[in-house]
């Protein structure tokens, strides 16, 4: 989360997103506390084993915003088509990031050139 840079029209980039979407695997009290402390809205569905244990008012969950998360899931799926990324051949983070960028460039070229044929 510390590497997030959200460009703004004026001024320096924001360091924190307004909301964070995650699947039920991220539904832990310490994650929700951290997000609340940093004023980030948690868009995480509650696990079924946590519903009975939860005390107090029910957790809010924006279903419409959560559905938009599929864009990221599809992007990760496309990236996993590249065996080099899926098996993490690149051990250095700098080289791995370069391969992610290369994979995205190839994806954009494949989409862009498919229309011209």
Image: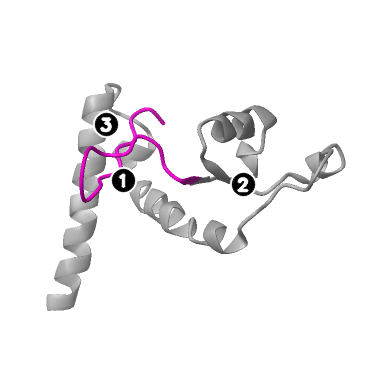
Q: In this view, does 41 lie above or below 89?
A: below
Q: Does the magenta stretch include residue 101?
A: no
Q: What stretch is highlighted in magenta?
A: 1-19
Q: Look at the numbered disc 3 and give the secondary structure of its residue.
A: helix
Tell me which corner region of the image, top left, top right, bottom left or bottom right, holds residue 36. top right
Spatial CA distance of label 1 from label 3 is 12 Å
Q: Look at the numbered disc 1 and give the secondary structure of its residue.
A: loop
Q: Main secondary structure of the magenta part?
A: loop
What residue did someone put label 1 on? Answer: 82
Front label number (2 vs 1)? 2
What residue did someone put label 2 on? Answer: 44
The residue at the point 56 percent across, 30 percent down is 37
Q: Nearer the viewer, residue 111 or 13?
A: 13
Determine whether, in the image, residue 96 is placed left or right of residue 33: left
Which of marks 3 and 1 precedes in the sequence?
1
Which of marks 1 and 2 precedes in the sequence?
2
Say which quadrant the C terminus sits in: bottom left
């Amino acid at each position: 989360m510390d590497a997030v840079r959200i460009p703004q029209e004026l001024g320096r980039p924001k360091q924190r997103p307004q909301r964070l979407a995650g699947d039920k695997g991220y539904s832990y009290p310490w994650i929700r506390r951290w997000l609340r402390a940093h004023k980030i809205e948690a868009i995480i569905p509650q696990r079924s084993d946590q519903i009975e244990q939860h005390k107090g008012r029910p957790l809010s969950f924006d279903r419409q915003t959560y559905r938009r998360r599929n864009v990221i899931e599809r992007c990760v799926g496309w990236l996993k088509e590249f065996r080099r990324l899926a098996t993490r051949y690149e051990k250095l983070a700098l080289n791995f990031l370069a391969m992610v960028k290369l994979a995205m460039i190839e994806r954009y070229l494949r989409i862009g050139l498919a229309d011209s044929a």
